[in-house]
Amino acid sequence: MAVANQNLKYLRKLRGWTQEEFAQKIGIKRSLVGAYEEERAEPNYEVLETVSDLFKVSIDDLLRKDLSESKGSYLAKRRQLKMIAETNVIHFVPVKAAAGYLNGYADPEFLDELNTFTLPMLAGGTYRAFEIVGDSMLPTPSGSVIVGEKVHNLDDVKNNNAYIILSKSEGVVYKRVLKSNRTKNKLTLVSDNPVYQPYQVNAEDVLEFWSAQMVLSRVNQGQRWDVTNLASLVSNLQDQVNNLKKKMN
């Protein structure tokens, strides 16, 4: 029955569903999906019948054939389509998953369990979305989702732009980045809210940069600012950045 177990896992991943989503589709508990995929339990005939109807695959093929090796079939075409669209799929890292992201950011199994969505207005690239909490980046409100594009090289990080940064010491944070001409092994992370002091991290400790492209937030989540407060906030931030640049250069 191991072939059927692996086929269920393969079909789930082919559609880009989490175990929870797959469980809902076939009318069983998520824990049972996990048990099937880890071969701690065998899917019964009713489950196989449901999966057969869902994916238009015969029960005999589910039991006997490794579907991941199928060529020229409906499944192979689905896989090709998924690979073509892969750059448009945005994995969403909620706050509750942020702690695990440090260990699982490069693990396909971890990423596969994250929910995904797409945004048609984004150009081709690799994107990820992160939920942020706290007021360090006001006026961006706590609970907003930052959609970032992957930056593959530190040289491509631009001074004073906003990034989601994954580092060994800080985990996932949303800050502006300042690079120094004198100390290239150090990066200064700056909050938009001047109440929070800038701090430094070692460049070698940074695992990922995601350049902020979009901010998604609920309509009733926006922070209300009057013109005086906003002008004061911008002025304080500009003074803070100018002082940092003087020290770094």
Image (tube, rainbow, N blue to C red):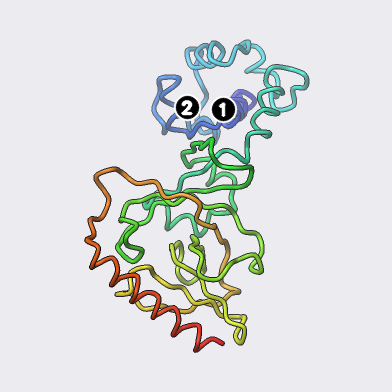
Residue 187 position within the rendered picture, expressed as x and y whole percent measured from the top left: 54, 76
3D distance between C-alphas at marks 1 and 2:
9 Å
- Mark 2: few/some/many CA within 10 Å (<14, 14-19, 20+): many
**Could you tell me residue 145's position as x and y percent?**
40, 49
Give the mark nearer the N terminus: 1 vs 2: 1
Which residue bears the numbered disc 1? 15
* Residue at image location 58% in from the left, 67% down from the top: 158
Residue picked out by circle 2 = 22
Q: Is residue 105 left or right of residue 170?
A: right
**Vertically, is 180 above or below 121?**
below
| Lateral position of residue 240 relative to residue 120, left or right | left
Q: Looking at the rendering, in which quadrant would you find the C terminus?
A: bottom right
In this view, 50 is above or below 151: above
> Residue drawn 59% across and 26% down?
11
Q: Nearer the viewer, residue 73 or 130?
A: 130
Q: Amino acid at mark 1?
A: Arg
Q: Quadrant of residue 155?
A: bottom right
Q: Nearer the viewer, residue 66 or 113?
A: 113
The residue shown at (61%, 42%) is 123
Mark 1 residue element: helix
As drawn, 124 above or below 77: below
Along the viewing direction, whichever of 125 and 229 lies nearer the viewer: 229
Q: Nearer the viewer, mark 1 or mark 2?
A: 1
Q: In the rendered view, does 88 fall on the left or right side of 240? A: right
Q: Residue at x 48, y 63 (%)?
A: 162
